[in-house]
Amino acid sequence: MNNKNNKANNILNNKTSKQSKDKKENKKENKKVILQLNNVYKTYYLGQVPNNALDGVNLEIYEGEILVILGPSGSGKTTLLNVLSGLDRPTSGDIIYIKKYNIAKYSEAKITKFRKEHLGFIFQTYNLLEHLNVKENIIVGQKLGKSKVDIDEIINVVGLSQHKKKYMHELSGGEQQRVSIARAIAKRPDIMFADEPTGALDEKTGKKVLKTLVDINKKYNTTMIIVTHNPGIAELADRVIHVNSGKIDKLIINDIKVDPKDITWG
Ligand SMILES: Nc1ncnc2c1ncn2[C@@H]1O[C@H](COP(=O)(O)OP(=O)(O)OP(=O)(O)O)[C@@H](O)[C@H]1O
Ligand SMILES: [Mg+2]
Protein backbone atom coordinates (compact mmCIF):
# COMPACT_ATOMS: atom_id res chain seq x y z
CA MET A 1 0.00 0.00 0.00
CA ASN A 2 1.47 3.36 -0.89
CA ASN A 3 1.60 6.32 1.38
CA LYS A 4 -1.27 8.04 -0.24
CA ASN A 5 -3.51 5.03 0.26
CA ASN A 6 -2.35 4.69 3.83
CA LYS A 7 -3.30 8.25 4.51
CA ALA A 8 -6.67 7.73 2.89
CA ASN A 9 -7.19 4.60 5.01
CA ASN A 10 -6.24 6.44 8.17
CA ILE A 11 -8.70 9.17 7.41
CA LEU A 12 -11.33 6.53 6.70
CA ASN A 13 -10.54 4.65 9.92
CA ASN A 14 -10.61 7.81 11.93
CA LYS A 15 -13.89 8.71 10.41
CA THR A 16 -15.34 5.28 11.14
CA SER A 17 -14.21 5.28 14.75
CA LYS A 18 -15.50 8.82 15.17
CA GLN A 19 -18.79 7.77 13.64
CA SER A 20 -19.15 4.81 15.97
CA LYS A 21 -18.27 7.02 18.94
CA ASP A 22 -20.89 9.51 17.79
CA LYS A 23 -23.34 6.67 17.44
CA LYS A 24 -22.67 5.50 20.99
CA GLU A 25 -23.06 8.99 22.39
CA ASN A 26 -26.17 9.45 20.34
CA LYS A 27 -27.54 6.27 21.75
CA LYS A 28 -27.03 7.68 25.22
CA GLU A 29 -28.62 10.96 24.25
CA ASN A 30 -31.24 9.31 22.12
CA LYS A 31 -33.36 8.62 25.15
CA LYS A 32 -36.48 10.55 24.31
CA VAL A 33 -37.69 12.88 27.02
CA ILE A 34 -41.40 12.29 27.42
CA LEU A 35 -42.02 14.57 30.39
CA GLN A 36 -39.93 17.39 31.76
CA LEU A 37 -40.34 19.44 34.91
CA ASN A 38 -38.76 22.86 35.01
CA ASN A 39 -38.44 24.62 38.35
CA VAL A 40 -41.73 23.31 39.67
CA TYR A 41 -43.14 24.63 42.96
CA LYS A 42 -46.26 23.61 44.80
CA THR A 43 -46.93 25.85 47.77
CA TYR A 44 -49.57 25.35 50.42
CA TYR A 45 -50.32 27.98 53.04
CA LEU A 46 -50.80 27.23 56.69
CA GLY A 47 -52.37 30.55 57.58
CA GLN A 48 -49.69 32.98 56.41
CA VAL A 49 -46.89 30.44 56.49
CA PRO A 50 -45.93 28.96 53.10
CA ASN A 51 -45.05 25.27 52.86
CA ASN A 52 -43.36 24.19 49.64
CA ALA A 53 -44.59 20.63 49.06
CA LEU A 54 -42.49 20.88 45.88
CA ASP A 55 -39.53 23.17 46.17
CA GLY A 56 -38.09 23.89 42.72
CA VAL A 57 -38.08 20.45 41.14
CA ASN A 58 -36.26 19.81 37.86
CA LEU A 59 -36.62 16.39 36.31
CA GLU A 60 -36.60 14.66 32.94
CA ILE A 61 -38.53 11.44 32.46
CA TYR A 62 -37.53 9.20 29.56
CA GLU A 63 -39.84 7.30 27.30
CA GLY A 64 -40.06 3.63 28.22
CA GLU A 65 -38.30 3.88 31.58
CA ILE A 66 -39.42 2.68 34.97
CA LEU A 67 -38.91 5.50 37.44
CA VAL A 68 -39.40 4.84 41.14
CA ILE A 69 -40.01 7.71 43.54
CA LEU A 70 -38.98 7.11 47.16
CA GLY A 71 -39.01 9.39 50.18
CA PRO A 72 -40.25 9.71 53.75
CA SER A 73 -43.86 10.49 54.60
CA GLY A 74 -44.73 14.10 53.84
CA SER A 75 -41.69 14.58 51.57
CA GLY A 76 -43.83 15.43 48.51
CA LYS A 77 -44.08 12.14 46.57
CA THR A 78 -47.83 12.19 46.00
CA THR A 79 -47.73 15.90 45.26
CA LEU A 80 -45.03 15.24 42.66
CA LEU A 81 -47.04 12.43 41.10
CA ASN A 82 -50.22 14.50 41.03
CA VAL A 83 -48.49 17.45 39.45
CA LEU A 84 -46.71 15.25 36.88
CA SER A 85 -49.98 13.64 35.90
CA GLY A 86 -52.03 16.81 35.73
CA LEU A 87 -54.27 15.74 38.62
CA ASP A 88 -52.98 18.80 40.41
CA ARG A 89 -51.54 22.06 39.15
CA PRO A 90 -48.17 23.45 40.24
CA THR A 91 -48.04 26.88 41.85
CA SER A 92 -45.31 27.78 39.36
CA GLY A 93 -43.00 26.12 36.87
CA ASP A 94 -43.49 24.21 33.64
CA ILE A 95 -44.41 20.62 32.85
CA ILE A 96 -43.51 19.88 29.27
CA TYR A 97 -44.86 16.85 27.46
CA ILE A 98 -42.65 15.53 24.61
CA LYS A 99 -40.66 18.78 24.59
CA LYS A 100 -43.61 20.64 23.19
CA TYR A 101 -46.74 20.95 25.24
CA ASN A 102 -46.71 22.85 28.51
CA ILE A 103 -49.46 21.02 30.35
CA ALA A 104 -48.97 23.19 33.45
CA LYS A 105 -50.60 25.98 31.47
CA TYR A 106 -53.53 23.92 30.14
CA SER A 107 -57.11 24.78 31.03
CA GLU A 108 -59.07 22.33 33.19
CA ALA A 109 -60.92 20.94 30.16
CA LYS A 110 -57.74 20.57 28.12
CA ILE A 111 -55.86 18.79 30.92
CA THR A 112 -58.77 16.37 31.44
CA LYS A 113 -58.71 15.49 27.74
CA PHE A 114 -54.93 15.15 27.84
CA ARG A 115 -55.07 12.80 30.83
CA LYS A 116 -57.75 10.71 29.18
CA GLU A 117 -55.80 10.32 25.97
CA HIS A 118 -52.24 9.92 27.21
CA LEU A 119 -52.08 8.86 30.85
CA GLY A 120 -53.00 5.83 32.91
CA PHE A 121 -53.47 5.62 36.69
CA ILE A 122 -53.25 2.86 39.21
CA PHE A 123 -54.51 3.74 42.64
CA GLN A 124 -54.18 1.92 45.90
CA THR A 125 -57.95 1.65 46.10
CA TYR A 126 -58.73 -0.14 42.92
CA ASN A 127 -61.89 1.75 41.86
CA LEU A 128 -63.32 -1.27 40.07
CA LEU A 129 -66.96 -1.73 39.15
CA GLU A 130 -68.49 -4.45 41.32
CA HIS A 131 -71.35 -5.34 38.97
CA LEU A 132 -69.01 -6.01 36.04
CA ASN A 133 -66.75 -9.02 35.60
CA VAL A 134 -62.98 -8.88 34.96
CA LYS A 135 -63.23 -8.59 31.20
CA GLU A 136 -66.01 -5.99 31.33
CA ASN A 137 -64.05 -3.85 33.80
CA ILE A 138 -61.10 -3.86 31.43
CA ILE A 139 -63.30 -2.95 28.47
CA VAL A 140 -64.44 0.13 30.41
CA GLY A 141 -60.78 1.22 30.49
CA GLN A 142 -60.32 0.55 26.80
CA LYS A 143 -63.28 2.74 25.93
CA LEU A 144 -61.57 5.72 27.56
CA GLY A 145 -58.88 5.75 24.90
CA LYS A 146 -58.70 5.47 21.16
CA SER A 147 -56.60 2.34 20.89
CA LYS A 148 -57.99 -0.92 19.66
CA VAL A 149 -56.05 -3.23 21.92
CA ASP A 150 -56.69 -6.92 22.17
CA ILE A 151 -58.40 -7.31 25.55
CA ASP A 152 -57.66 -11.01 25.80
CA GLU A 153 -53.98 -10.32 25.23
CA ILE A 154 -54.00 -7.80 28.08
CA ILE A 155 -55.82 -10.22 30.35
CA ASN A 156 -53.10 -12.70 29.55
CA VAL A 157 -50.28 -10.22 30.28
CA VAL A 158 -51.71 -9.49 33.73
CA GLY A 159 -52.17 -13.21 34.34
CA LEU A 160 -55.94 -13.27 34.73
CA SER A 161 -56.96 -15.53 31.84
CA GLN A 162 -58.55 -17.99 34.23
CA HIS A 163 -60.54 -15.29 36.02
CA LYS A 164 -62.06 -13.46 33.06
CA LYS A 165 -65.66 -14.07 34.05
CA LYS A 166 -65.26 -13.48 37.78
CA TYR A 167 -66.79 -10.56 39.65
CA MET A 168 -64.67 -8.35 41.89
CA HIS A 169 -65.77 -9.92 45.20
CA GLU A 170 -64.56 -13.29 43.87
CA LEU A 171 -60.98 -12.01 43.48
CA SER A 172 -58.07 -11.56 45.89
CA GLY A 173 -56.60 -8.11 46.56
CA GLY A 174 -53.70 -8.76 44.20
CA GLU A 175 -56.01 -10.00 41.46
CA GLN A 176 -58.16 -6.90 41.83
CA GLN A 177 -55.06 -4.73 41.61
CA ARG A 178 -54.13 -6.55 38.39
CA VAL A 179 -57.61 -5.87 36.97
CA SER A 180 -57.04 -2.20 37.75
CA ILE A 181 -53.66 -2.35 35.99
CA ALA A 182 -55.25 -4.06 32.98
CA ARG A 183 -57.96 -1.44 32.91
CA ALA A 184 -55.39 1.36 33.00
CA ILE A 185 -53.29 -0.23 30.26
CA ALA A 186 -56.25 -1.08 28.00
CA LYS A 187 -56.23 2.39 26.51
CA ARG A 188 -52.48 2.11 25.90
CA PRO A 189 -51.40 5.23 27.79
CA ASP A 190 -48.02 6.80 27.08
CA ILE A 191 -47.30 7.07 30.77
CA MET A 192 -48.63 5.01 33.64
CA PHE A 193 -48.67 6.46 37.16
CA ALA A 194 -48.92 4.30 40.26
CA ASP A 195 -49.13 5.58 43.84
CA GLU A 196 -48.24 2.74 46.23
CA PRO A 197 -49.52 0.02 43.87
CA THR A 198 -48.56 -2.71 46.32
CA GLY A 199 -49.26 -0.81 49.54
CA ALA A 200 -52.20 -3.03 50.50
CA LEU A 201 -50.64 -6.30 49.39
CA ASP A 202 -48.52 -8.99 51.00
CA GLU A 203 -45.11 -9.87 49.59
CA LYS A 204 -46.17 -12.72 47.31
CA THR A 205 -49.13 -10.86 45.82
CA GLY A 206 -47.21 -7.59 45.66
CA LYS A 207 -44.42 -9.20 43.65
CA LYS A 208 -46.96 -10.61 41.20
CA VAL A 209 -48.40 -7.14 40.70
CA LEU A 210 -44.91 -5.71 40.18
CA LYS A 211 -44.13 -8.43 37.66
CA THR A 212 -47.25 -7.34 35.79
CA LEU A 213 -46.01 -3.75 35.69
CA VAL A 214 -42.57 -4.83 34.45
CA ASP A 215 -44.13 -7.11 31.81
CA ILE A 216 -46.30 -4.27 30.52
CA ASN A 217 -43.30 -1.96 30.43
CA LYS A 218 -41.38 -4.50 28.35
CA LYS A 219 -44.23 -5.43 26.05
CA TYR A 220 -45.66 -1.98 25.29
CA ASN A 221 -42.70 0.25 26.24
CA THR A 222 -45.05 2.15 28.55
CA THR A 223 -43.26 4.67 30.75
CA MET A 224 -43.92 3.79 34.40
CA ILE A 225 -43.74 6.17 37.33
CA ILE A 226 -44.16 4.41 40.65
CA VAL A 227 -44.37 6.04 44.07
CA THR A 228 -43.62 3.77 46.99
CA HIS A 229 -42.52 3.49 50.59
CA ASN A 230 -40.95 0.15 49.85
CA PRO A 231 -37.23 0.66 49.04
CA GLY A 232 -37.04 -2.87 47.58
CA ILE A 233 -39.18 -1.80 44.64
CA ALA A 234 -36.40 0.57 43.63
CA GLU A 235 -34.37 -2.49 42.58
CA LEU A 236 -36.56 -3.09 39.52
CA ALA A 237 -36.39 0.52 38.29
CA ASP A 238 -34.23 2.06 35.59
CA ARG A 239 -33.85 5.13 37.78
CA VAL A 240 -34.76 6.00 41.34
CA ILE A 241 -35.34 9.44 42.78
CA HIS A 242 -35.37 10.25 46.46
CA VAL A 243 -37.59 13.12 47.45
CA ASN A 244 -36.94 15.05 50.64
CA SER A 245 -38.72 18.22 51.79
CA GLY A 246 -40.06 18.85 48.31
CA LYS A 247 -36.68 18.49 46.60
CA ILE A 248 -35.03 15.68 44.69
CA ASP A 249 -32.00 15.00 46.85
CA LYS A 250 -30.74 11.87 45.10
CA LEU A 251 -31.05 10.32 41.65
CA ILE A 252 -29.78 6.79 41.14
CA ILE A 253 -29.36 4.98 37.83
CA ASN A 254 -29.61 1.21 38.16
CA ASP A 255 -27.09 -0.61 35.97
CA ILE A 256 -28.70 -3.89 36.88
CA LYS A 257 -32.42 -4.26 37.24
CA VAL A 258 -33.62 -6.99 39.59
CA ASP A 259 -36.42 -9.33 38.58
CA PRO A 260 -39.52 -8.51 40.66
CA LYS A 261 -39.56 -11.96 42.24
CA ASP A 262 -36.01 -11.42 43.57
CA ILE A 263 -36.33 -7.92 45.04
CA THR A 264 -35.88 -7.34 48.76
CA TRP A 265 -39.35 -6.83 50.17
CA GLY A 266 -39.18 -3.87 52.56
N1 LIG B 1 -54.04 19.69 50.09
C1 LIG B 1 -53.03 20.02 50.90
N2 LIG B 1 -53.11 21.12 51.69
C2 LIG B 1 -52.09 21.48 52.50
N3 LIG B 1 -50.93 20.81 52.59
C3 LIG B 1 -50.78 19.71 51.83
C4 LIG B 1 -51.83 19.25 50.96
N4 LIG B 1 -51.39 18.13 50.33
C5 LIG B 1 -50.16 17.91 50.80
N5 LIG B 1 -49.79 18.84 51.69
C6 LIG B 1 -48.50 18.91 52.39
O1 LIG B 1 -47.47 18.79 51.44
C7 LIG B 1 -46.40 17.96 51.89
C8 LIG B 1 -46.18 16.79 50.97
O2 LIG B 1 -47.31 15.92 50.98
P1 LIG B 1 -47.41 14.60 50.11
O3 LIG B 1 -48.77 14.08 50.24
O4 LIG B 1 -46.92 14.90 48.75
O5 LIG B 1 -46.36 13.66 50.85
P2 LIG B 1 -45.94 12.13 50.55
O6 LIG B 1 -44.49 12.12 50.33
O7 LIG B 1 -46.82 11.59 49.48
O8 LIG B 1 -46.27 11.43 51.93
P3 LIG B 1 -46.81 9.94 52.24
O9 LIG B 1 -45.63 9.05 52.08
O10 LIG B 1 -47.24 10.03 53.66
O11 LIG B 1 -47.93 9.61 51.30
C9 LIG B 1 -46.79 17.58 53.32
O12 LIG B 1 -46.16 18.48 54.19
C10 LIG B 1 -48.29 17.75 53.34
O13 LIG B 1 -48.74 18.05 54.62
MG1 LIG C 1 -48.31 10.00 49.43
Image (cartoon, rainbow, N blue to C red):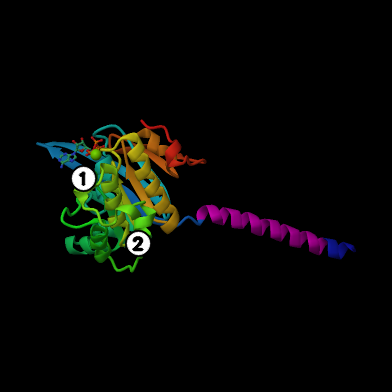
In screen coordinates, is 221 left or right of 86?
right
Q: Residue 252, how many percent across, how many down?
A: 44, 38
Q: Which residues are magenta?
A: 7-29
In this rendered view, identify the residue nearer to me: 161 or 97: 161
Residue highlighted by disc 2? 152
Determine if the magenta segment contains residue 9.
Answer: yes
Residue highlighted by disc 1? 125
Residue in the image at 37% along x and 43% along y: 208
Inspect this view and state whether residue 77 appears.
Answer: yes
Residue in the image at 38% along x and 61% along y: 153
Q: Residue 211, how many percent across, how many down?
A: 40, 45
Inspect this view and state whether residue 40 appears.
Answer: no
In screen coordinates, is 30 left or right of 222?
right
Q: Amino acid at mark 1?
A: Thr
In this rendered view, identify the residue nearer to me: 202 or 57: 202
Number of marks in picture: 2
- Nearer to us of marks 2 and 1 is 2
The reply to whether the residue tagged 2 has its Cβ within 8 angstroms of ligand 2 is no
Quick one: SS at disc 2? Answer: helix
Residue in the image at 29% along x and 56% along y: 164
Q: Are marks 2 and 1 in contact (CB under 8 Å)?
A: no
Image-quarter location of ligand 2: top left
Q: Residue 88, how many percent across, how many down?
A: 21, 50
* Quadrant housing the C terminus: top left
Q: Amino acid at mark 2?
A: Asp
Prevailing SS of the magenta stretch = helix
Determine if the magenta segment contains residue 46.
Answer: no
Q: Residue 19, how many percent across, how many down?
A: 65, 59
Earlier residue among tags 2 and 1: 1
Residue in the image at 11% along x and 36% along y: 48
In this rendered view, identify the residue nearer to me: 246 or 27: 27
